[in-house]
Image (cartoon, rainbow, N blue to C red):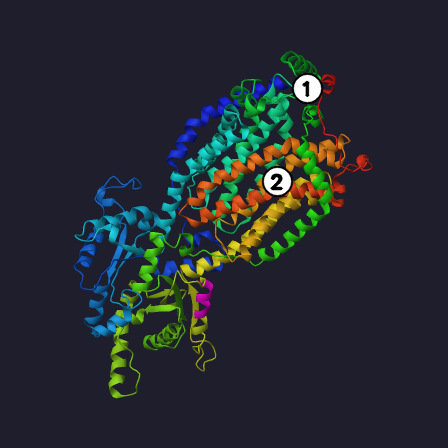
Amino acid sequence: MLERLERWSRWTILFMLFLLPWAIYGVLNLPVGAAALHKWLPTGKPERQRYERFLELFGNDQFLIVSWDDCRVTDPRVAQFRDRLVQEPNQVNSQVTSEDLNETPKLVESVLTTSDVLATLTAAPLNLPTNEAVKRLRGFLIGADGTSSVVVRFTQHGISNQKLAIAHVKKAADEVANLGSNSLRMAGSIYETYAVDEASESSLKKLVVPSCLLGMLLSWVCLRSVRAALAVLFIAGTGQLLAIALVYYSGGYFSAVLIVLPTLVFMLTLSGAVHLMSYYRDVSRWHKNHLGSRAMLLGFKPSLLASITTSLGMAALATSQLAPVREFGLYSAVALSIATFFMLLGFPKIADWFCGAGKPTGKLAAIPPDMATSEATDKTLAEVDDVLPSVDAQNLFDAAFHPAQVSPRTERYVAWLFKNANAITFIGLVLMAVSFVGFLNLKSSTKFGDMFPSKSPIVRDMAWIEEHLGPIASVEVLVSFDADSELDLYQRTVWVARVAKQIRTCKDVGGVMSALTFLPPQPTSASLRDVVKRSALRKLLEKNLPVLQEAGWVGHAGGQQVWRLTAKVSSIADENYGVLVDRIRQAVNQVDLRAGASKPVFTVEYTGLSPVMHETQLMLLQDLGASFSTAFLLITPVMMLIARGFWAGLLIMVPNVLPETLVFGTMAWLGFQLDVAGILTASVAMGIAVNDTLHFVNWYARRLSLGDSRSQAIADTLSSCASAMFYTMLISCCSMLPFLLAEFIPTRQFACLMIAMLSSALLGDLVLLPALLMSPLGLCLVPKRSANLSSNIETKAIQPNQNEATKL
């Protein structure tokens, strides 16, 4: 069996080496991008459907707002900048397949400047006074201090290629004398998407390599063997390449959420490889040949079950209603399964090749002290190896063949645990309950301003634009009149004016723009002069309605005439978009929609990216609870199967639930908000924590089945597994450290939460879990045939000896 396993291992390695060039090609060519925010929501979600209807009716609402210091209406650079913007690039970029330069898709659909709009408002037929025209544009195109702006509207091609579109804007600025791209202040949804993509790509290029190098360094320090470190890093690195290549060859791209996938797979595969290397160290004490195969067989069951449970934790994210989170769950589950397959089948020969085929170095070369001479050691190892090939394969998994050496320090620690088991159990359960209360009050955020540090240039530009121009985010208020409405165009504008007036009463609204912005003032009196003005206004409305429709202020859908009002709200305020939309809704509700009629004169809908972002924010918390619950329901039956009991399975899940409730609960109590990357950590951390728990429980259950008392079994288990558990935690946490330097805060939060959860998971596995097992609750895990054994701690260490090995 061992020789057959080694043949499989060789073929597996050769197959992976054959695929390696394709994997590297996928890594080098993987695109970075992000889906439109409204596409994060499920297709059946009312908010998404409402927003997509709005896009069909009025076109996209993704604008780029551009300004600079001392930008005024009379600034000659504004016109020059506008002229450069409408000139399309003279070369075909890599994403354009057209061979004819003239057929290159346009990036810019239109450019609107403050001076252009002011000229329109002050010219015939409106002939508005300049101060009135400025008042109408304040909060949109001109600020209270006179700062003017340029608003760029991109085509669908420009929206789909934000990087190219923003590069075109910067190039246009560089071509204007005394301006330059470094002087620009930009904001808007398309720029936000561009900034997120740039931060993702920067993190991929700058932080993944340091993360891997730090993992390599810690692997060498922990394993105390260069060859052992290289072996586990080769396995983990190959798993990482496979994860990235999987995204590329499945037609995906790296988003801000998927950016942590390579490091995550690297960390998980490295964790499993370190555990296998720990088993390699154990078998090297008792065998002379086929060490890699023996180690893999010894660790096969817990490693495979750990991979299954961790993949189940990842797959739990597939229940998410948010598309990027769902993709992350599926990609990570599949990538981890493939990496585990390579790890288990490739480990036998990789370990033997790197570690010298039975001549391990460093810590792996530890030999029991009673094997004093090399001759005695070789003789004992040879006797064991002669017997084991004839033993049934199932026995190769048995811990009885590889008893651990229990140090006096471990004995003292187990004695302390035994003495304080009930107190530790009580504290752990109370801490989990208190944390769970905070967990239920956790808040989330999807605001762009919360995704970058407050001192970053992107956030500074947003703050500058809101201070000098007005709020950036938009809430679209749609006023719809039925086809059978008896109101004429003028009467409809009167109702729209009333709605706009009420919206302006909201202190959070910086400005309101609608079709009324481009129409003469409405006469309010019953004088003959105003009657004539109303008559002229009716004729003007009839004439200019197609112009208003083309400009995207009036539309028709399903027999209804829809008038659009755009309310500007702050994107950096403390209030979430839900609160801002509710305030606008409350203000609009002050308008009497019936006016004495039997049914409302019109209906009102609220949409735009701001309401969509609010809905996404709510779904973050729903998905956190759903993914956590799903991961628990998927993993717990596996633990029950391992523990061979319902209550036993629930008991050993306690240390795996504690890290999530503790970290998220503390986060809520301290007032921190959860972002899109944070929801990934719940099921991911549970899957990782279960990895160590399975190795611990697997060894513990086998020692109990051999007749050990609970304290003896825990001492032996700690001696065999604790170091590998600590090493995997240390290596995994240190691999996440570089991501704490990421400019993109969701990536930084993911790393921070993972470090906190992995650290608390280790405490749960090395402190709370042993205490639970030695408390009265732990009796549910003790086999019935061993239930009558004494549970008092043994003072004598479990020491292997040469005679026991020879008898095997």
On the image, the x and y values in percent for residue 696 come to 66, 36
Q: Which residue type does callout 1 highlight? A: Asp
Relative side of 157 to 771, left or right: left
Would you say 457 lies left or right of 291 here? left
Q: Residue 579 in magenta?
A: yes
Task: Measuring from the top left, give residue 808's x and y in whole percent.
Answer: 73, 19
Residue 370's tag is: 1
Magenta portion: prevailing SS class: helix
Query: According to the image, label 2 marks what residue?
Result: 690
Question: Which of the two discs, 1 and 2, labels the residue nearer the N terminus?
Answer: 1
Q: CA distance from mark 1 to mark 2?
A: 36 Å
Q: Report the number of numbered marks.
A: 2
Which amino acid type is shown beneath numbered disc 2? Val
Q: Which residues are magenta?
A: 577-583
Element type at mark 2: helix
Q: Closer to the camera: disc 1 or disc 2?
A: 1
Q: From the viewer's perspective, is 612 left or right of 670?
A: left
Rendered image quadrant of residue 764: top right
Residue drawn at the location 73% of the way across and 20% of the way down? 804
User: In this rendering, would 615 be left or right of 182?
Assistant: right
> From this viewpoint, is residue 315 visible?
no
- Residue at the limit of the structure toward the right, as seen here: 788
Against 71, is 798 above or below? above
